[in-house]
Amino acid sequence: MGESSGTSLEITVISCENLRVTEDPYVVVRAESLNCFTTKMAKDSGSNNSSLFSWNEKAMLKLPVHARSITFEVQCNRFKAVRPVGVARVAVSDFLAGGPPGNSVHVSSCRLRDWEGKDNGVIRFAVRVVPP
């Protein structure tokens, strides 16, 4: 995993759909470290019982040498406390195996699971490996 040493990723959190939540959610993204970035809260823009939350927020994430996955955790604030809504973990190798860094953008979606392991929507995101 020496490839990830000093590697930075540009991550764009695009949207979530079919998310069962009553408060306005936000997303925390981290790569097996305390360093993370957090999106702003999103309002439901869906219709016909299909919740759609959109962010389109871009941030840089530095990968620690030991990182094997990126975690997308959807949370919301309820009664002044953080409430986890769903989590998705994506292997770093999915993005680093595509060859040298450059302008290649990987757009993906991943199923979110709540803390009981049940499906709770789908998150869409884009990842680009940033050249050193």
Image (cartoon, rainbow, N blue to C red):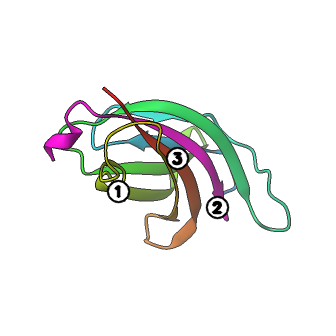
Report x, y in % for residue 8: 34, 32
The residue to which callout 3 is attached is: 126
Range drawn in magenta? 1-19
Apparent side of residue 40 relative to residue 33 in the rendered image (left or right) = right
Q: Earlier in the sequence, mark 3 or mark 1?
A: 1
**Badge count:** 3
Circle 1 SS class: helix
40 shown above or below 120: above
CA separation in Å, label 1 and label 2: 25 Å
- The answer, for residue 12, to whether it is visible in the render is yes
69 shown above or below 120: above
The residue to which callout 2 is attached is: 19
49 shown above or below 86: below
The residue to which callout 1 is attached is: 94
Name which residue lies at 35% across and 56% down.
94
Q: Amino acid at mark 3?
A: Ala
Which of the pair 107/89 is nearer the observer? 107
Report x, y in % for residue 51: 74, 60
Apparent side of residue 120 relative to residue 114 in the rendered image (left or right) = right
Q: Give the quarter of the image for residue 80.
A: top right
Q: Amino acid at mark 1?
A: Asp
Report x, y in % for residue 55: 65, 41
Q: Earlier in the sequence, mark 1 or mark 2?
A: 2
CA separation in Å, label 3 and label 1: 12 Å
